[in-house]
Amino acid sequence: MPDFAKILILIATGEASYHAQNDHCASTFLRQAGVQNSWVNLASVGMKGNGLMQMLELNNLDIASFYGKWLLRHLR
């Protein structure tokens, strides 16, 4: 996994996604393997009820805005 150490990684989980129970484990696994990442539960930042296909959600522009702001914060 050393190649992943150079990549900016965000794991974003929608509360209605079938990944909701496991994404924090993927984040922990990556961190233990030396890969820095950020994990966020979208409900904890005010975007409730989203599933896995976030681009199809009614609030997809809010989600995209969150991703854009996250990228700007972490790329600078």
Image: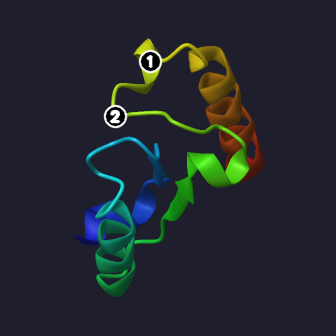
Residue drawn 43% across the image and 60% down it: 6
Q: Amino acid at mark 2?
A: Leu
Q: Residue 17: give x, y in percent of width and height.
A: 34, 42
> From what the image shows, is residue 53 above or below residue 76?
above
Q: Residue 48: give x, y in percent of width and height.
A: 60, 39
Coloring scheme used: rainbow
Determine the image quadrant of residue 70.
Answer: top right
Residue drawn 71% across the image and 48% down it: 45
Q: Residue 52 got which mark?
A: 2
- Quadrant containing the N terminus in the rendered view: bottom left
Determine the image quadrant of residue 58.
Answer: top right
Indicate the secondary structure of the residue bearing disc 1. Answer: helix
Farthest residue in the bottom direction?
32
Determine the image quadrant of residue 16.
Answer: top left
Left or right relative to 6: residue 61:
right
Q: Residue 30: give x, y in percent of width and height.
A: 32, 73
Dot 1 corresponds to which residue?
Answer: 55
> From what the image shows, is residue 56 above or below residue 11?
above
